[in-house]
Image: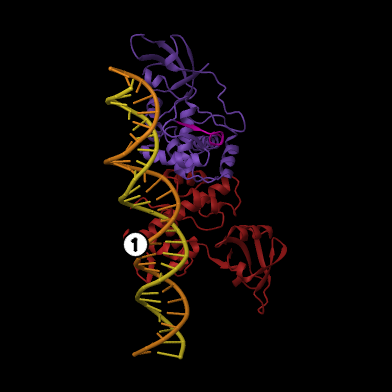
Chain colours: A purple, B red, C yellow, D orange
Amino acid sequence: MKTLSPAAEDCLLFAYRIVEKGEELSVSALARGLGVGDSTITAMIQKLAKQKLFHHVPRREISLSDSGRELARGLIRRHRLIETYLFQKLGYSWDEVHGEAERIEHAVSEKFVEAIDKELGFPKFDPHGDPIPSGEHSADSRKLRRLSDMHVGDHGKVARIVDGKPDALIYLTKLGLELGSDVEVTYAPAQDEIVHVSVEGVQRTLGAHVAANILIEG
Amino acid sequence: MKTLSPAAEDCLLFAYRIVEKGEELSVSALARGLGVGDSTITAMIQKLAKQKLFHHVPRREISLSDSGRELARGLIRRHRLIETYLFQKLGYSWDEVHGEAERIEHAVSEKFVEAIDKELGFPKFDPHGDPIPSGEHSADSRKLRRLSDMHVGDHGKVARIVDGKPDALIYLTKLGLELGSDVEVTYAPAQDEIVHVSVEGVQRTLGAHVAANILIEG
DNA sequence: TTGTATATTTCGATGTATCGAAATAAGGAA
DNA sequence: TTCCTTATTTCGATACATCGAAATATACAA
């Protein structure tokens, strides 16, 4: 009950991320996200449902149980703390941390997690601005807006990049968009799916797609 | 050829340690050391022999090939660097590092290894005084003596603990025997398998068994 | 009510690590 | 030379994560 396989942990982890984004949990979403076949997920969910980590009504619904959510929170915490550690202490860039963390996380002990948490000074966010769950309150109390939802003249600081794959993160870095960067919307044609922004004073143009995953604070 | 399973890495790693100690490589020695059945090792060796990492003359001899030794050196380096990192940067004690490293080592990238090496300032020895292979020269150039081989009046500093299981290391810590501790042999009865030593001025008595794995420099 | 598209599940199969029991070979003893 | 001890290997078996193909159930449309 305590020792999940890496594959099972990945499943729980990804399910938590889907739920965190407010999206629908399904076999196909998990399969896509984890890069495995649908039948692999069906088998996994059945196994995890037996361990009461998921509720599963075959063919109808999948959801995290309370204990599953609880456990997943711990896994997310571990993942994000490792990412933060790699970034802050070992010189990794924000596009490199996810891949390395994904492999390391299944191997480290609770002691390791708490040691790096302490070493980092109990950070609240990882290098992508994702909140690091801890103790009781994990909810991101910041009020963030999608860059794609902002209007001309609105401005603030980049606070979080949602779902950033390495290539996307490298792209953002090249545009000068990092956590904390000042951005202001300068032009947002209603006719097109783009937004013009000023990033630390430099003009950039972003597709709505990309802008939707950039969350701004303030 | 590049991607070995954790089990295969463990096998190579343990084989290297056996050879490093000058002992005989055998199926049973590996099985005992890795805590698996003999038949598991036979299968593993056959697989690794196919990959030219071991030379295997069935029922007669097992040895590391050049490329196997090469590869194992890298694995040992990785293991010992991780141990050193846990000890120096994350507050682990010398009895805790091996277990944690054993699990983490299979998951980290080359980049990670080089990052911690740099962060540590390119250490030459791990928390047990075992040499960390690097580049070309890995041989421990120190001239060390087993504490059990020393005579009354001989003295020096603890430089390495060989094969220290966690319980043994905790025991040594309790006796004040750490790397760098000053020790002097005060009495070594030829009639008995014990040795009396002064550790940082305090009198202690050790069994020959334990003393044989304590290496002294100077 | 019936049909059908689509998501899900079931059903063998594969590859890996592991086991214990039984077979077997090497090396030393007689 | 023959026998016996002991290490090693072979031989099924189990457990797991995975696959693709085929079967199937649901939900929605007609």
- Residue A39 in percent (x, y) is at 37, 39
Tell me the kind of residue under disc 1: Ala
Q: Residue at x 49, y 65 (%)?
A: B32
Residue at image mark 1? B49
Query: Viewer-proximal residue, A185 or A11?
Result: A11
Percent coordinates x, y for residue B181 in the rendering: 64, 59
What residue is rendered at 48% in x and 60% in y?
Answer: B34
Q: Quadrant of residue B205?
A: bottom right
Question: Relative to A22, does residue A37 appear above or below in the rendering?
Answer: below
Left or right placement of residue B110 versus residue B145 in this view: left
Q: Does the magenta stretch include residue A45?
A: no
Q: In this view, does A150 lie to the left or right of A124?
A: left
Tell me if residue D10 comes above or below residue A78 in the rendering.
Answer: below
Q: Which chain carries label 1?
A: B
Comparing B154 with A206, the one in front is A206
Residue B122 shows in this picture: no
Residue B32 in view here: yes
- Which span of residues is magenta-colored? A61-70
Q: How many marks?
A: 1
The question of residue A68 being in magenta is answered with: yes
Image quadrant assignment for residue B38: bottom left
Front-lying residue, A71 or B204: A71
Report the residue that reaches farthest toward the right: B202
- Residue B112 lies, with reference to residue A134, above or below; the image says below
Give the percent coordinates (x, y) of residue B125: 52, 55
Which residue: 46% across, 44% down? A6
